[in-house]
Image: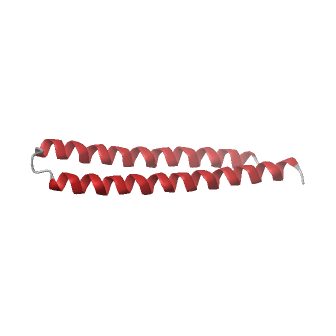
Amino acid sequence: MDQKTIFKQMVDFNKGAFNNAFNAMVMVQDQNETLANTMLNQATWMPEEGKKAVQEWVETFKKGREEYKKTVEEAFKKVEAYL
């Protein structure tokens, strides 16, 4: 086996590991979002401004994780282009 093949296998393995870890992180964040929404709906004492701030926070996290995934996927494409 030549070094190029071994390196490609390593990149593929790392790409798969990243995708699995990212998907697990997304599942945890989605469950936390559901929990937060349930709590906010039941929190009659919390003002609407506070609820809106939490919703904006959740949306910011979603945008951030999608940008992160996009950046990592672009990096993997660059590495694969060298192969």
At 56% from the left and 45% from the top, the residue drawn is: 72
Q: How many marks?
A: 0
At 22% from the left and 53% from the top, the residue drawn is: 39
Q: Is residue 42 left or right of residue 17?
A: left
Q: Is residue 14 left or right of residue 31?
A: right
The image's colour scheme reads secondary structure
Q: Is residue 8 left or right of residue 49?
A: right
Q: Residue 4's x, y, as percent?
A: 83, 49
Observer-nearest of 54 and 45? 45
Q: Residue 50's x, y, as percent?
A: 17, 42
- Quadrant for the N terminus, please: bottom right
Q: Residue 13's x, y, as percent?
A: 69, 53
At 29% from the left and 43% from the top, the residue drawn is: 57
Q: Residue furthest right?
A: 1
Q: Residue 46's x, y, as percent?
A: 12, 45
At 38% from the left and 49% from the top, the residue drawn is: 62
